[in-house]
Image: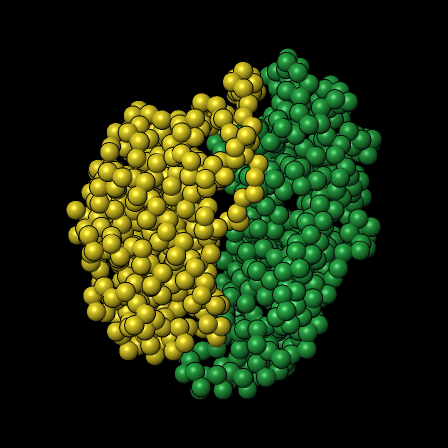
Amino acid sequence: MLNRRAFLRTGAAGLLGSLAASRLAFAAAPTDNRFVFVFLRGGLDGLHALAPFADADYHRLRPGLALQADQVLSLDGYFGMHPALAPLMPLWQDGTLGFVPAAATGYRERSHFDGQNMLENGSGQPFGARDGWLNRAILGLNGGDRRLGLALGPAVPLILQGPAHVQAWVDEQLPDLDEDFLARLAQVYQADPLFAAALGDARGAPEPDMGMGAAGAQGDRRAFSVAARAAGDLLARADGPRIAVMELQGWDTHTGQAWRLERMLETLADGLRTLADRLGPAWAQTVVMVGSEFGRTAAQNGSGGTDHGTGGLAMLAGGAVRGGRIAGRWPGLNDAALFEDRDVLAANAYEGIFKAILIRHLGLTPAFVEAAVFPDSRAIAPMEGLLR
Amino acid sequence: MRDIDSFTALNRFGMGAGPGDAALIGGDPRGFVGAQIVPSAGLPAALAGFAPSATMIADYATARRARDGSLRAVNQRQFEAYRDEVLAAAALAVTTPAPLRERMVRFWANHFTVSRSRGPIANMIPAYVREAIRPHVFGRFADMLKTVVRHPCMLIYLDNPSSIGPRSASGAVRMRQQGLETTLNENLAREVLELHTLGVDGGYSQDDVIQFALALTGWSHGGLRRGGGEEIHGRFVFVPRQHEPGPKTILGRTYPEDGEAEVPRILDDLARHPATAQHLATKLVRHFVADDPPPQAVARITRVYLDSDGDLAEVTRAIAALDAAWADPLAKVKSHQEFVLAVNRAAGNATPQVPDLFRPLRLLGQFPYLAPSPQGWGDRASDWIGPETVMIRLEWAHQFAARRAGGQDLRQAFDATIGPVARDATRTWVFRAPSQDAGLTMIWTSPEFQRR
């Protein structure tokens, strides 16, 4: 018996074989454009991933933390990528990677959990909706077949929860059950809609492998890479899902930020490269957005880290992205520019980026987006110039 | 098991239903629950003999300071201690005649989450729960809060030892030498206000966070701080040279400079605050009544909390007395831990081993004490049930049943677990199962079993 993780490590064969036999169901999708949202939970420090290394205020605020000119990968002489993002440099150079600094949702407090909830529910306030905006977007894509969404990991995050049926993929499984047993169980589950829906979404072809081996902790680098590989392979399929959500924990860097973010950013870069590679030709039709619930304080704190802030970063990658440029408005870091005297101002709205992707890339109508996906967002226009 | 209330007593208020549990309840399910609420019961024998956190921290810090390669062995030994205590606590949960206490220990440990995601303390969390949570689950909330915030594991998890008052002796030097804007770290102060006490809408401001963080400066421990030449003992210490001098004003009340004594006063006031009562009552009612807590029940528990000055025995009694908590026996979904423990209890597996606990929880994404953030695990059905998790629960239960079948009578297993609440379809298909292990799997994975 072969453990799926071990199977991947040996590289003896592609992932596709085991995916084909997994319990994911496939169907014809109405769009060939792909969207992947990579959720960095914990509050990414935008100023450390995309450093304004030529700004004197940046060095004043972060005397022990600021990246120096000889450390960063300069993009335009003012902003530079953290060196751990070096694997993404070719994407920048070929115009399929872009950044929006000073970006955030409309959330202006500093709770991770409210901030994440608001980013995911899309109602404009924490706990303002019980389902996720990306799930509601899927409803608008194709009423006939809704099997478009894919969560990587055992739990479906709120952003993908809701009336549209979505699938989940996890990289290790137990001995499977026979169809007859599942058919019987479906009878037992019939009276309980929660369990009936979950089982209905899960049933598919039987699962051949017997994985009970060691798994990494959450946030584990290899786990993210494996998930990226699975996402790439599944999204590349003609009959596969079109929208996926990946999560990476561990961005809440109150202490030891320099070395922690170096590891985290390496993991992120590695996963994004893997995703791009596995998507193959479909990369041309893909938008990947990397985002977080908020940014962090402009100044470093007392522990070589940063505390919860406001304006953060959005990264956009993929063949459908008009990359090679820093988009949006940059407010700067001088005293007058900071939000509440401490945070990077949120000059660019995540909601505007989301709306641009939904309307220009996935083809939803503005009316649908403003009625069902982001109901409180009429004041925020889709951000221009992000996509090809 | 004869009646629906017995199901509720064992599942909503307990750790699941096992073969001997009907006898435990007798004819009085509500009395069975109430009788378990006894303030100080002492440490259960099953958990005696595990090392104090101070010893573990001291061993770890000593090995780290020695730089002689001994840290690896210490880590391994401490991981084994962690694993053994998690298994011992699981054995307790599946055998105890007083399962409400185990449920409350897990509830409050989750409320005051410390997660393995932070290196050195990863293996000390069972000790933290044993020392800071367990003694207080039927005591006063303020005592639990003060013990938790003072505990080295929480201080380390939320970065407090490296938070230094900018105008303290140490801070002034650092500010000047390093040109810093601040030497504070807000993490612990913010999470105590947001998660542990007032709640995110509890009416505090960013200034309150900073003022509370200033009061917390100097709260540290003898051990894991890097670079310090301090004495290693692994216990709490107050470091005056890091403490911000001067009064602190939090939620409109000014606390004069009083060194180490400031924080306990602030915590006492936070524990008494109506927003804290409301926040805790909402979480408790969500846990014991429904994912969407009924406002009347929340109001009732808030009232009892305030009137009893945060006496958790009174509060727990009041929850058990809510008719709403007994109205719908299937209102809640078991978390993955609750589900896995309930299967072990149903199977009469008195000493769960690694494959009975850690493996399924790793696959399901609820590895013991590895909550993704200080918020802890969620408490709603949508946190637990999705297409992948429903299948993993099924497949693991099937494997577990196959290993344990034989000797368990299907009729008795059915009656002891879901008998009073089983739907007709469930009953029909369980007894039509082609084999005993298929029947057991079907009981354990029925929606009725997976709910509480």
Position of the C terminus of chain B by quadrant:
top right
Which residue is found at the position 77% from the left and 29% from the top? B19
Q: In this rendering, does residue B101 appear at all?
A: yes
In front of the other: B296 or A302: A302
Q: Residue A8 location in percent, x, y? A: 44, 39
Which residue is found at the position 34% from the left and 66% from the top? A47
Check the image and tell me how it is coloured: by chain
Which residue is found at the position 49% from the left and 39% from the top? A5
Q: Residue A152 location in percent, x, y? A: 42, 40
In front of the other: B448 or A9: A9
* Residue A282 as seen in the image, left or right of residue B321: left
- Quadrant of res A212: top right
Q: Residue A162 location in percent, x, y? A: 41, 36
Q: In this rendering, does residue B145 appear at all?
A: no
Look at the picture and state if A45 lies above or below A15: below
Position of the N terminus of chain B by quadrant:
top right
Q: Residue A309 location in percent, x, y? A: 39, 65
Look at the picture and state if A39 lies above or below B289: below
Chain in yellow, by letter, is: A
In front of the other: A137 or B141: A137
Which residue is found at the position 33% from the left and 64% from the top? A82
- Quadrant of res A364: top left
Chain in green, by letter, is: B
Q: How many marks?
A: 0
* Residue A142 as seen in the image, left or right of residue B356: left
* Residue B365 as seen in the image, left or right of residue A85: right
Look at the picture and state if B180 lies above or below B123: below
